[in-house]
Image (tube, rainbow, N blue to C red):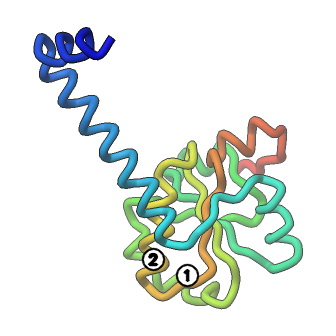
């Protein structure tokens, strides 16, 4: 089997190189999130934090996607504009902040940005809004 993998890699070196690059980026992304001290919260854990600790949910999706359906009480700050809106998040510095993206993959980088900006209680929603919807939890439109 190893000889077949080596043969494939030598015959299709571009595909093998791209696969290796994607694997490396995925490992680095997970490592960054783990080192940041944040947790991936389940939908149930997010709900508890919102109800007991007045957590603020930040939806990182584009405004059009946010308007199609978002977690009640969440605010929309697209990931590409997060650094420009750090001042808007200052009022939540003493509360838990949960980052939500489409599928849970992009929010790890947002968690790191907020941690670097001095936020200490920042987490991400496991599986993003897709996970929320998969658990048949409510969304608010508009």
Q: Position of residue 107 (x, y in %)?
A: 51, 57
User: Residue 89: which numbered mark, if any?
Assistant: 1
**In the rendered image of this protein, does residue 64 appear above or below residue 112?**
above
Corner quadrant of residue 125: bottom right
Q: Position of residue 76 (x, y in %)?
A: 57, 63
**In the rendered image of this protein, does residue 133 appear above or below residue 52?**
above
Corner quadrant of residue 44: bottom right
Where does label 2 land, which residue?
Answer: 85
Q: Is residue 2 left or right of residue 64?
A: left
Q: Residues within 10 Å of mark 1 (few under 14, many from 20)?
A: some
**Residue at the image point whose x is 43% and y is 59% from the top:** 31
| Towards the viewer: 94 or 71 | 94
| Towards the viewer: 52 or 31 | 31
Q: Are marks 1 and 2 in contact (CB under 8 Å)?
A: yes
Give the SS element for disc 1.
Answer: helix
**In the rendered image of this protein, does residue 136 appear above or below residue 140?**
above
Corner quadrant of residue 73: bottom right
Give the SS element for disc 2.
Answer: helix
Q: Residues within 10 Å of mark 2 (few under 14, many from 20)?
A: few
User: Residue 54: which numbered mark, if any?
Assistant: none
């Amino acid at each position: 089997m190893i000889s077949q993998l080596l043969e494939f890699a030598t015959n299709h070196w571009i595909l093998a190189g791209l696969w290796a690059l994607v694997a490396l980026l995925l490992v680095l992304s997970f490592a960054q999130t783990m080192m940041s001290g944040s947790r991936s919260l389940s939908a149930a854990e997010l709900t508890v934090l919102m109800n007991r600790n007045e957590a603020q949910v930040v939806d990182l999706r584009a405004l059009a996607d946010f308007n199609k359906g978002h977690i009640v009480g969440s605010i929309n700050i697209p990931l590409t504009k997060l650094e420009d809106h750090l001042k808007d998040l200052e009022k939540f510095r003493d509360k838990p902040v949960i980052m939500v993206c489409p599928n849970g993959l992009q929010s790890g980088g947002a968690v790191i940005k907020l941690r670097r900006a001095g936020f200490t209680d920042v987490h991400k929603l496991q599986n993003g809004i897709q996970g929320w919807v998969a658990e048949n939890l409510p969304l608010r439109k508009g």
